[in-house]
Structure formats: C-alpha cells, structure tokens
Image (cartoon, grey):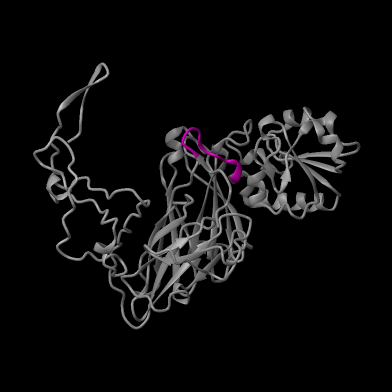
C-alpha cells in the first residue's frame, strides 16, 4: 500500500513535514488535538502549504466532521482533497465551522491573513500547538528545517538468548555540531511504549553503541522485540541517523546478521531467501509511522513473478510483526527468493532459524530486469557480430539475432530463451575491458560535426 506522502526531492533534498507529524511526541499531541476537535463540532480544513494530504495519510482525520476544505493558491481551487472540492479561502466564512484547522507549522503569518475570514465564533487552530519543545530542535527559528528531524527507526530484540546491538557514530561533530544528544523511545510489537530516555554524546567523532541487553537490564524489562525510534538533537550537516544493527546470541547456533538504516520507500524489497529443508525464515515488518498498516496491504511474491500473496495481519502504529513466509509459499525452498511488496513498512529484516541442520551460506541472486514491452533487448557490451550488426558496415543491418546455444534459466527455472525480451544481464569480460566500439563516419549536422556511434 503506497502512502501518498512527499519524502524527498532531487532539487531541495528531504521533506521534513512527514517526519514532523510522525514524531512519537507529536503523534501523541496530534491524537489529543484531533479528539478535542472531533467533539467541538464541524471543522473546516485550510491547506495553504499543501501539507493536508500528508497529514491525512499519517493521522486519522475521518473522526472529524469535515465541513469544507479551503486553499489559498488559485490553481488549487477545484482540486479534490480528502474527498472534498477545494474552495477558495475567501469563502471560509460561509462554511459555518466551529473550528478551522490550518495544516501547517510556523503558521502565524498564514493564520493572521485569514482571521478576518473566520466564521463567527470559530476557533483557528494551527499545527504549532503540537510542536516539539524548542529544547529538542536544532533550529528553533525554522521548525521544518530537516536538521530538526534527524531521526530513524531501528529493530531491537532481546529474547530467547538472542540480542541486538546498534552501532553508529557522532559524525555531526564533523560539521560543527556540539552538545548533541539522542532522544530515544523503545516500542513493543503493538506500538506501546517500553522506555524513553536521552543519551548525551561527547563532543568529537566517536562511536555509539546501543545494546538491547544493556537496555533490558537498565529499565528492568522482560523479553522484548520492537522498534527503537532515535532522534539526534543538535544535528549539523546531516539529517538522517545512519546505523548498523547486528544480531548475536548466547549460544553458538545464533547467526550474526547485519542490516543498515535504509528507510527509503520502494515498491519492492528484494533478497528475502526461502528456507532450506529444516529451516524457518522469520520476516520482521516494522511500521515507521503512527498510522496502522491495514491487513492485506503488504505481501510477498517470488522474485521475478507478479503473483503477490498478502499477509492477513495488520501492523499497529510504531509496531512490528514477525511473519512466516512459508505461510504464503509453503512449497518454496532455497534458492528461491522473495520480494516484499508494499511501501508503508520499512525494508524487511530477515532472520534464519536453523532447526535440524545448520544453514549453509547463501549468495544473493540478482533479479533479471523487466523491460517495458516493445523496448529492444539491451545489447551494450556485446560484440557487433552477436548483435546482428555488420562489423564492416557503416551502421546497423537488419539481420536476425543468432539463437542461443544453450537454454538460460531464470530464478524459477524457466527457459529464458523463450522470452522474446532476451537476457538483460550485462555481458562484460572478466578481468578486462568491455569490447571496443568502432567509430562511425563523420557527417555534417547543421554547423557542427558530430561522430555517429558505431
């Protein structure tokens, strides 16, 4: 299930609004605010900054009696927003709303511009009422500065003799940061709070270790598995908490496994292995947002296949679930691999559980790229004689491609030679350079001379 939120732009970098309204402290405050507004009567929504859609994706606005949605930009008038036709803010007074919610931070100026347009007796509320305290901000003067939300989520587990250890570094000091500290909250599998604490960081580049066994002892916790939310306060130069998490155990049968802090949204996450006989693979899915992941919105497919089978379980906000891929694909064994289909949860952390026999090393296999229908096969690096090109002629010649000498099997054992698209894997000579390409003749093109590729 794809969330309709903006997270990154190549022009301006990361968007921080979704982080701002998804922070655990802000999520708590927003929940209380929306509950109050739901009991106060009709609510008009004003969206001068374009944040309303993201807010609705991460928080349940359906509890409100929405009277109308209003916008400031002329080009947005008439858009469908939350099922409502957007109206110009100049018509705000006619809504008859008891409350007007302005979906934005640092909204004092935007609020002052519309106070004279409010319905009689209406209250104007902005998201500044749910801001984090200034003491938790790197730049209090600009709330949505990405450095105010240098955050991330990690998977921590301490149960049945199995532990996890997060390792990172104070790299912000290399950008001039000082007096940094980490605000952290540990959630259980249902998104409930287990512990909240802060950790001061020494000035200077140094390593940081957060161990699940140490946390369990410090706070007197029982066995747990869940999500650790990390917020770097005082960050400079970098707005993401990068880390690696290792697993280790009390016994010799626990495999060491590492995953890094890759939280980019994607349609597919590859590399989940099917079990060998006598093994069980556990897929841990984490929800990095306050809104729940509905049952059926995340599933698996065999790598290279489009048959997606959904997990029939929901994931609460900030919660996680341990899922068994064999429940969806009981007959699949290694070397088959799965892809996780869905965009609301983080990338998967897979743990292998050896039972009757020790696991063997597994090599990741690359998925064959899918080519849009009608595009010719990619033959870069293939000698001209194998592309149907005339090695002595000035350009391409219409010749049939030679038949493959042997069948090429894809990941599920199908004959790739029957695929009209052919094999898209790059053909390069090991230990040498790619085959040279003969330059074509020069020709005049306007007032410039260009060289045709051979």
Taking the magenta stretch, the answer to whether it contains residue 49 is no
Question: In the image, what residue occupies the spot 76% across and 32% down?
Answer: 111
Question: In the image, what residue occupies the spot 82% across and 35% down?
Answer: 92
Compared across the picture, whether 292 is left or right of 271 comes to right
Q: Observer-nearest residue: 221 or 1?
A: 1
The percent position of residue 378, horizontal first and vertical second, equals: 26, 48
Compared across the picture, whether 355 is left or right of 96 comes to left
User: Relative to 338, is 153 above or below?
Assistant: above
* Residue 398 occupies quadrant: top left
The percent position of residue 34, horizontal first and vertical second, equals: 76, 51
User: Relative to 66, is 295 above or below?
Assistant: below
Q: Observer-nearest residue: 216 or 260?
A: 260
Which residue occupies the extreme bottom position in the image?
356
User: What range of the chain is rendered magenta?
Assistant: 9-18
Which residue occupies the extreme top position in the image?
447
The percent position of residue 294, horizontal first and vertical second, equals: 61, 63
The percent position of residue 145, horizontal first and vertical second, equals: 57, 35
* Residue 181 occupies quadrant: top right
Q: Quadrant of the N terminus?
A: bottom right
Which residue occupies the extreme front position in the image?
398
Question: In the image, what residue occupies the spot 69% across and 30% down?
Answer: 74
Q: Quadrant of the C terminus?
A: top left
């Amino acid at each position: 299930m794809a969330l309709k939120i903006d997270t990154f732009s190549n022009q301006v970098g990361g968007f921080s609004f979704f982080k701002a309204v998804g922070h655990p402290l802000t999520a708590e405050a927003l929940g209380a605010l929306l509950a109050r507004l739901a009991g106060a009567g009709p609510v008009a929504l004003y969206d001068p900054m374009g944040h309303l859609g993201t807010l609705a994706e991460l928080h349940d606005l359906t509890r409100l009696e929405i009277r109308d949605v209003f916008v400031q930009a002329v080009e947005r008038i008439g858009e469908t927003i939350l099922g409502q036709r957007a109206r110009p803010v100049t018509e705000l007074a006619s809504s008859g709303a008891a409350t007007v919610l302005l979906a934005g931070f640092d909204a004092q100026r935007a609020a002052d511009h519309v106070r004279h347009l409010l319905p009689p007796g209406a209250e104007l509320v902005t998201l500044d009422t749910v801001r984090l305290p200034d003491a938790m901000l790197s730049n209090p003067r600009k709330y949505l500065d990405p450095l105010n939300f240098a955050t991330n989520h990690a998977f921590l587990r301490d149960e049945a003799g199995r532990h996890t250890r997060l390792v990172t570094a104070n790299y912000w000091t290399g950008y001039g940061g000082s007096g940094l500290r980490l605000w952290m909250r540990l959630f259980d599998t249902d998104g409930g709070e287990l512990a909240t604490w802060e950790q001061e960081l020494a000035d200077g580049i140094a390593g940081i270790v957060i161990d699940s066994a140490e946390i369990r002892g410090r706070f007197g916790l029982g066995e747990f598995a869940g999500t650790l939310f990390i917020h770097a306060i005082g960050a400079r130069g970098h707005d993401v908490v990068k880390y690696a998490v290792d697993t280790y155990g009390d016994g010799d049968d626990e495999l060491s496994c590492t995953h890094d802090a890759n939280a980019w949204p994607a349609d597919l996450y590859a590399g989940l292995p099917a079990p060998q006989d006598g093994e069980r693979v556990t897929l841990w899915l984490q929800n990095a947002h306050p809104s729940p992941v509905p049952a059926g919105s995340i599933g698996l497919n065999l790598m290279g296949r489009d048959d997606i089978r959904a997990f029939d379980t929901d994931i609460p906000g900030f919660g996680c679930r341990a899922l068994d891929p064999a429940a969806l694909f009981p007959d699949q064994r290694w070397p088959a691999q799965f892809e996780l289909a869905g965009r609301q949860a983080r990338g998967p952390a897979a743990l292998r559980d050896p039972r009757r026999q020790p696991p063997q090393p597994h090599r990741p296999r690359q998925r064959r790229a899918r080519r849009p229908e009608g595009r010719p096969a990619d033959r870069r690096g293939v000698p001209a004689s194998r592309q149907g090109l005339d090695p002595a002629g000035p350009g391409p010649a219409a010749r049939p491609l030679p038949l493959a000498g042997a069948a090429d099997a894809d990941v599920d054992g199908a004959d790739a030679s029957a695929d009209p698209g052919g094999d898209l894997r790059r053909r390069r000579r090991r230990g040498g350079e790619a085959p040279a390409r003969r330059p074509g003749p020069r020709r005049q093109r306007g007032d410039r001379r260009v060289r045709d590729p051979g």
